[in-house]
Image (cartoon, grey):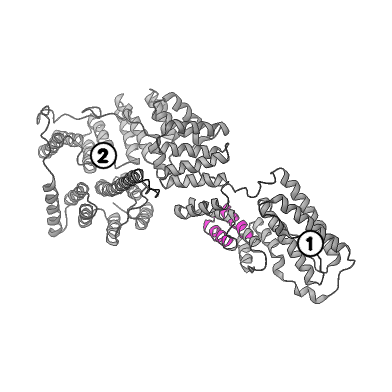
Amino acid sequence: MNFTTQAAQDILVKIERDPAEVRHWRQLLILCFDQKSIDTLQTLQAITAGIEQIWNQRRQRAKDAYEEAKQKQRSTGSTEPLPSTTVHSVPLSVRQKETFIKLAKNPQQPALLYRFGLYLEEEFGLPQAACALYERALSIGPEDVQTEEKVIEAIKRLNARVQEGPRKPSHITPGSDMGVVISPETMGVKSPSHHRPSAAALIKRTGRLSVDRSRLQVGQNILTETAWPVTQKKLDDAMSRLLTRTAVVCETAPRPMRLPRSIAPSQWLEFLEGHVTLLLATLEAQDIIIRTSINLEQAPRSDVAARTDLVLALMEEIEQGLASMDTAPKTTSLKAEIKPSMAQLEDIFEWIDAGALAEAESHLRQVRDDAFPKEQLSEVWSHLGLAFQNNHESKRAMVAYQKARELNPENLQAWFNGGMIQHEEGMLHPALQCYLRSLELDPEQAKIWCNLGALQFQLGEFQHSVDSLNRAVGLKPDYSRAWDNLAGSLCALDQLDEAERCCLRAINFKTDYADPHFKLGSIYFQQNRMEDAEKAFRKVLEANHGYPLAGHYLAIVLARTNRLENAMEICETAATPPGETELPSLAWNEMAFHLYEKGELHEAIRAYEKALAFTPERAVIWLDAGVAYQQLGELQQAMLHYSQAVDLDPELARAWHNLGAVKTEIGDAKGGHQALEEAEKLLARGR
C-alpha cells in the first residue's frame, strides 16, 4: 500500500494528533479499499477491530459506572451528579501512541502488530482481539525468527486459556452438509429486513442538536420592540439639537457619534450616556461649566424606560444651560488639551461597519481602559467580536469577547457569543461554563437554555438536556428549535411518544422546518409505521433536498414496501454528512438484500460493495457479498470476501463454512478442511 498520496498523508496527520480515534482508521480502510490494496486492508481491518474493542470496553465501563452511581443515588438519596456515559477519548501512554502512529504508517510490520497485540492482551484485557493481531502478524511472516517465536508463543498462550465449550449439537453431523454454501437467509439468521435503525441510536450517535446562533435580546423587557425605535429617534433628535447648540458656544465641540443600531436598547443607552458624559467633559476642558441636577445612576440599569427619561432630562438641562451663552470662548491653547481618544470610538465603529476589522482592532487596543466607561468599551469589543464571528474568524472573535468580559464581567452578549464559538469548535466544557455564566446574568433567556440543552446532549447528559430545553419552551412557547431539540433528547431517552408530540409542536410553529420532520420519520420508522415514515421523510426532502440521511431512510422504507427501483434511485443521490457511515451502509445493505432475493446478483454485489465503502469493518457484509459472488461462479472473489469476513470476525461460523466450501471447490482440500473444521468448532460452541 502506497501511503504517499495526499489523502493518505492527511489521514496520517489526523492519527498523529489523536492515535486512538477510530474514525481516522476507518478512513484508512476506505482508502485501501478504493486502491484495492487487499493485504494492507486485511491488516488494517484487524487493527481497527482492536481499536474498536478498546472503545467498546471504555463505553461499557462508563455505562457500568453510571448504573452503579445511579443505584447508589437511589439507595442513599445522594444528590451527587451522575458520571457521563459518553466516552470522548481513549487515553494512551506515550509508547502506545508511538506504536499506533507507526502502525498507521506501516500496518504490515509484524513486530508492531505483535506489540499492539500485547497491549490488547495485557493492558486492555482484550485477549480475542489480541489473538487476531497475533494471527495476522504470523500470516504476514515475521522477518526475524525471534519475533516469529514470540508471536507463536503468544497464540499458544491464548489458546491455552480458552475453556472447553459445550459439545456440538446432535443435529450437526461432521462433513454431512459442510460443503454447502450458507446463504444470508439460512441458519436462522435474520435478513436485513428485520433490522430497524433505532431513532434513539441514530440521534445519540450523531451527537448533535441544533444551536441557535442569533443574538440575545437584552434589556427589551421594559420597552417593546415596536416602541423602542420611536424612543430611539427621540433621543437621537435631542442629541442632535444639543450638539448644534454646543457648536455655537464652544470652539471645539465633540463630533457626532454614530451609535450602532444592532445592539439592545440598554446597551445603546449606555453608549449615549457615555457620549453625554464626554460632551460635558469637553465643555469643562474649555472652561464652560454646565450645572446639572440629574444623576443617571438613579434609575436601575435594567429599567430602559426610566433611564431614557433621565437621559432626556439631562440633555434638556445641558441645552438650557448652553442657551444662556452667546459666543464661544477664543482660547487657542485649549484645542491642544482635548485628548484625541475622545473621538476614537466613532471612527472604530465606522471601521467595524465598513469591514476594516484589523484597523478597528488595532486602534481599539490603543484606547486606554480609563478613557471611557468600561461598560462602553466592553460593548465596543463585543461589537468587534460579533463582526469577527460573522466573518468566521473564531479565534479573533474569542479574543475580542474575552477583552469585553474583562472590562465588564456582566456583558451578557460576550459570554453567550463566546460560548457559542467554543460550542461550535468542540470545546464543550468551556462552552458549558460560558452558558452557565450567561444564565447567572439573565436566567430568562430562552436561547441560552436551548443552546445549553444542545450542549448537554453532546455531553451525554440527556436528562439534563431535557430539563434545560423544557425551561426554554416554558419561557418561549413558540420556540420551534427548542421543541425540536427537546424531541431529540427525548428520543435519546427512548421516550418516543413524548418526542413525537414535541416534533408536532415544532412543526406547528414552523411548518417547513426539516429537522422535526426527520425526527418524526425516524420515530415512525422505528415503530414500523412505514406510511407515516414515508410522508415525513418526503416532507424533509421537500423542505431541504440535500438533507443528510433522509434519502437513505426513505430508500429503506420504499424497499420494504416493494418499490425497489424507486428506492435505488433515491439511495444513489442521498446526501451523507461527513463521518456518518451507519445508516448509508444499512441502506445499501437493504438494497443488496432485496436485489439478491430477486436474483439480480450483479446489482446485489454492486450494492454490497457500496455498503462496504461505508463500513469496511463489517464482517457479515463481506460474507453476504461473497455468497453473491459464489452464486455467480466467481470463486476467487468469493474466497477473497470470505477471507475478509473471517479476518474481521474469527468467530463467524458461516464465513468459515463458506470459505471451506469454496476452497474445497477450487482444489485446496487442505485449506478447505481446516476452514470447515473451524466452522464446526464454532458451531459446537453455539457461535
For the question of whether residue 548 can be seen, the reply is no
Q: Which residue is mark 1?
A: 293
- Are the two marked residues, 2 and 1, in contact with CB atoms closer than 8 angstroms? no
For the question of whether residue 50 can be seen, the reply is yes
| Residue 463, percent from left and from top | 43, 42
| Residue 587, percent from left and from top | 37, 33
Report, in whole angstroms, how far the alpha carbon at label 2 lies from the one at label 1: 84 Å
Describe residue 327's horizontal placement relative to residue 184 as left or right.
right
In the image, which disc is placed on residue 619?
2
| Residue 318, percent from left and from top | 81, 61
Q: Earlier in the sequence, mark 2 or mark 1?
A: 1
| Residue 507, percent from left and from top | 54, 32
Q: Decide whether residue 384 is among the magenta residues.
A: yes
Residue drawn at 34 percent across, 51 percent down = 21
Chain part drawn in magenta? 380-405
Describe residue 495's horizontal placement relative to residue 306 as left or right.
left
Describe residue 342's horizontal placement relative to residue 539 as left or right.
right
Report the amino acid beneath label 2.
Answer: Ala
Report the amino acid beneath label 1.
Answer: Ser
